[in-house]
Amino acid sequence: MDKKQFIEIQRQDWNRVAPGWEKWDEKLSRNMSFINHRLIADARLRPGHRVLDLGCGTGYPAILAGQAVKSHGSVVGLDLSEEMLAVARRKANAMGLSNVEFQTKDVTTLPFETTSFNAVVSRFCLMFLPDIPRTVSEINRVLKPGAYLAAAVWSSPDKNPYIRIPMDVIKKFVELPVPAPDQPGIFRLAREGDLSGIAAKSGLTKIADEDVRGESIFDSADEYLESLMEMAAPLQPLFAKLSPEQKKAVKTEIKNEVDKYKKENGIALPMTIRIVVAQKPD
């Protein structure tokens, strides 16, 4: 599969799950709030800044960035999925944010002038790209001297029951090929040095490369499973390989595994996100 085909398949995948992301937006925003705020802080945003959000999906952290830079700053959010961006626009409009715009673009090549942004942020996007070094070089190009890149990617599977459980269960029913080290995927940049090393090769200076732990809270295992089935674009093709009987068995086992993380306030699934921060030299 060439890069254009790969990107088009990703566009279709994320367009398909956009209604699910809108349905679960409040729950997702609560569970991911600590990451959104961490990225805004690590990017050192201030009023008046111009910010680029890569893979902004349904609007975060772009919307939070728009609030941080205020009316005399601006934010551009890029994403492949027109349907995800339609959700983002509805949210921004409802909040009265006129300084945030969303564009349907492939983030591999950035259509902006050199040294035109005070910061670039990205949440759960870079690991899905077919050519990460090219994109990071483009990030370096559009950043102003002294500006920051702040990115969130998933850490390793063993630290992420939130994602690992359904994948482990599905593997019991269908054979999944072992991905190549450079193949795009959820855990592509999970290890320390993966993304920060690429950033360093592009000319950016590493500021941070660390795991940040949190919990994704659900009222019940049923709620977790329902949200998973409606939002998880990478997992849907795997479910499609299962027979009706296998799907029923997989769902039952996923809920049983998730129930092991039950607490007083519901299901609390551990998740670990790798935060990478880099700065363009002055």
Image: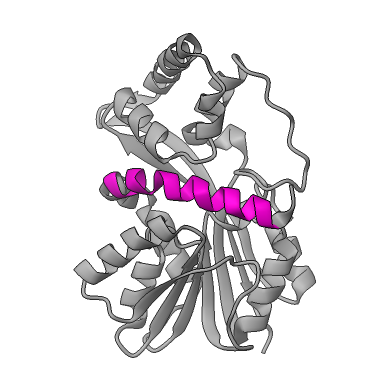
**Residue 278 seen in the figure:** yes
Tell me if residue 126 comes above or below residue 78 in the rendering.
above
Q: Is residue 21 magenta?
A: yes
Q: Residue at x 52, y 26 (%)?
A: 240
Q: What's the magenta region?
A: 4-23
Tell me if residue 246 comes above or below residue 264 in the rendering.
above
Q: Quadrant of residue 133?
A: bottom right
Q: Quadrant of residue 225?
A: top left
Quarter containing the C terminus? bottom right
> Closer to the camera, 186 or 153?
186
Please state if 259 lies on the left or on the right of 121 as rendered.
left
User: Whole-percent x and y of residue 146?
Assistant: 61, 86
User: Whole-percent x and y of residue 186?
Assistant: 60, 44
Q: Quadrant of residue 82?
A: bottom left
Q: Is residue 97 magenta?
A: no
> Closer to the camera, 186 or 68?
186
Please state if 231 lies on the left or on the right of 278 as rendered.
left
> Closer to the camera, 45 or 21?
21
User: Whole-percent x and y of residue 23?
Assistant: 27, 45
Q: Residue at x 53, y 68 (%)?
A: 105
Q: Residue at x 33, y 37 (%)?
A: 217
Tell me if residue 186 comes above or below residue 136 in the rendering.
above
Tell me if residue 57 comes above or below residue 230 in the rendering.
below
**Residue 127 seen in the figure:** no
Please state if 197 lies on the left or on the right of 273 as rendered.
right
User: Whole-percent x and y of residue 15?
Assistant: 44, 50
Colouring scheme applied when the structure was drawn: one colour
> Closer to the camera, 16 or 266?
16
Please state if 17 lies on the left or on the right of 7 as rendered.
left
Q: Main secondary structure of the magenta part?
A: helix
